[in-house]
Image (cartoon, rainbow, N blue to C red):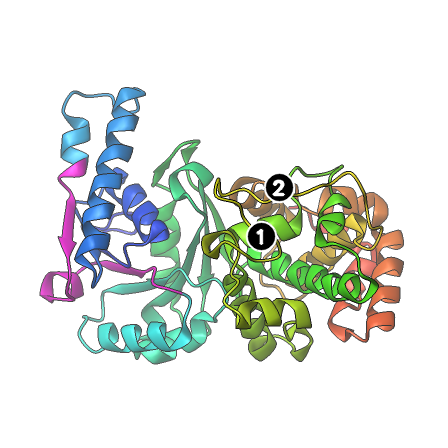
């Protein structure tokens, strides 16, 4: 096994993310990709979807040789159980639900049976690689590899060390991920030098979730419909934050905030309306009700003609800029170009630094006032933001 080549790879979890990760691994220079799930139905669904994805690539002339699509698809091996060939993989990637107990139990089971050469990667969105590494019993070989859905299209991977991750494991994964084919040619790989919940993207986005759910509580108090909050952002995006949250799942947003509450700051405690909706099982589009109610055609009835004036899009950017500056201050990333690329390529939105270069003084004041008014110390602008010195950290 060389630094940029893995012969056998396993992916545990055949949900949408696991399927997407398996796809890009199959397109890489590996020999076999094991896809593992306890559900036979999930595995059969994954097999059909992967077959469809590969055939579509062939139709679009992605492959240069005849028979290439068949060769790629034949790399896939399905399994309902963790067994020896999987434990003998060069790389095992877990993509199971974002539940700390599920993940730690799985990693403990894997860690007990793998060799010292096998690298364990977690696609966690909110937990730390350090705690997952400790659970595995192989912290030096445990690493974070965060993909965006769908991985082939988004073409971005965040790679993060835990406190005990070895430099050798880190660089092997970096070099391998840079060779993975993607829709845009190859993956953009973002290295994170230190451990943090949420990697780059979720570190920037989850504080925004805290902000707009706090504003939702204010709207409820004033009798203002949620749709008017989404209307506040209509000039910059077609899909407002509440509509997007419904699509992604309110249970997901709630769990993300709870994880950050424990690992980052108590300020991330989920707010009243979100907590109420989740307690009732109103998780958004998938349950037919979230911030909005969904009709039989799966679409909510939303009127964005009237703005509330409560939700400030500039403040949302200010929150992102502050979080990005914290990542630089904490030396988690070495320059802000990495953050900008993750937001642009992985998330599909503009990062905060380009507009922030011209607005940091105004945004710092906005954020400081909001922090004081709402007693949220976490939103207090950091020194790198207020000073504007982040401008010097582009490369």
Residue 303, picture quadrant: top right
Horizontal relation, residue 103 to residue 42: left or right: right
In the displayed structure image, the side of residue 39 where residue 215 appears, left or right: right
Q: Which residue carries the number 1 mark?
A: 293
Q: Label 1, secondary structure: give it.
A: loop
The answer to which quarter of the image holds residue 187 is top left
Tell me which residue sits at (37%, 74%) in the image: 133
Q: Is residue 360 left or right of residue 143?
A: right
The residue under the point 12% across, 66% down is 83
Number of marks in picture = 2
Q: Residue furthest left?
A: 84
Q: Which residues are magenta?
A: 73-97
Judge whether 181 appears above or below 329 on screen. Answer: above
Nearer the observer, 59 or 247: 247
Above or below, 278 against 359 in this view is below
Where residue 245 appears, x then y in whole percent? 58, 54
Distance from disc 1 to disc 2, alpha carbons, whole Å, reads: 27 Å
Q: Is residue 73 above or below residue 333?
A: above
Q: Residues within 10 Å of mark 1 (few under 14, many from 20)?
A: some
Asked if the stretch drawn in magenta spans residue 237, the answer is: no
Q: Residue furthest front?
A: 296
The picture quadrant where one finds residue 311 is bottom right
Q: Look at mark 2 in the image and give the residue it sits on.
A: 349
Q: Residues within 10 Å of mark 2 (few under 14, many from 20)?
A: few
Left or right, 369 with respect to 68, comes to right
Q: Residue 249 got which mark?
A: none
Towards the viewer: 160 or 66: 66
Tell me the element at label 2: loop
Q: Are marks 1 and 2 in contact (CB under 8 Å)?
A: no
Asked whether residue 196 is in view, the answer is: no
């Amino acid at each position: 096994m060389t630094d940029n080549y893995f012969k056998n790879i396993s992916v545990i979890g055949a949900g949408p993310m696991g399927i997407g990760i398996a796809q890009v691994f199959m397109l890489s220079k590996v020999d076999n990709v094991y896809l593992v799930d306890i559900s036979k139905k999930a595995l059969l669904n994954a097999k059909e979807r992967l077959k469809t994805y590969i055939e579509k690539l062939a139709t679009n002339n992605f492959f240069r040789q005849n028979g290439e699509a068949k060769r790629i698809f034949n790399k896939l091996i399905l399994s309902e159980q963790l067994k020896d060939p999987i434990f003998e993989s060069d790389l095992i990637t877990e993509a199971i639900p974002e539940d700390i107990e599920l993940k730690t139990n799985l990693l403990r089971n894997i860690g007990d049976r793998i060799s010292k050469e096998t690298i364990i990667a977690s696609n966690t969105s909110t937990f730390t690689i350090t705690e997952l590494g400790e659970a595995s019993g192989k912290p030096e070989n445990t690493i974070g590899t965060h993909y965006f859905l769908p991985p082939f299209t988004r073409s971005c991977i965040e790679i993060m060390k835990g406190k005990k991750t070895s430099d050798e494991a880190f660089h092997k994964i970096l070099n391998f991920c840079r060779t993975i084919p993607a829709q845009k040619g190859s993956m953009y790989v973002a290295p994170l030098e230190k451990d943090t919940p949420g990697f780059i993207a979720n570190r920037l986005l989850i504080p925004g979730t805290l902000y707009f759910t706090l504003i939702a509580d204010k709207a409820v108090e004033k009798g203002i419909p949620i749709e008017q909050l989404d209307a506040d952002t209509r000039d910059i995006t077609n899909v407002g934050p509440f509509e997007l949250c419904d699509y992604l799942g309110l249970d997901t947003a709630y769990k993300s905030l709870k994880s950050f509450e424990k690992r980052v700051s108590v300020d991330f405690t989920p707010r009243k309306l979100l907590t109420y909706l989740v307690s009732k099982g109103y998780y958004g589009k998938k349950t037919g009700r979230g911030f909005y109610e969904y009709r039989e055609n799966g679409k909510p009835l939303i009127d964005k003609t009237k703005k509330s004036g409560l939700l400030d899009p500039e403040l949302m950017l200010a929150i992102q800029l502050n979080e990005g500056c914290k990542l630089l201050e904490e030396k988690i990333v070495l320059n802000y170009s990495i953050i900008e690329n993750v937001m642009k390529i992985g998330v599909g939105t503009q990062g905060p630094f380009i507009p922030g270069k011209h607005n940091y003084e105004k945004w710092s004041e906005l954020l400081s006032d909001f922090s004081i008014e709402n007693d949220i110390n976490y939103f207090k602008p950091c020194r790198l933001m207020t000073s504007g010195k982040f401008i010097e950290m582009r490369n």
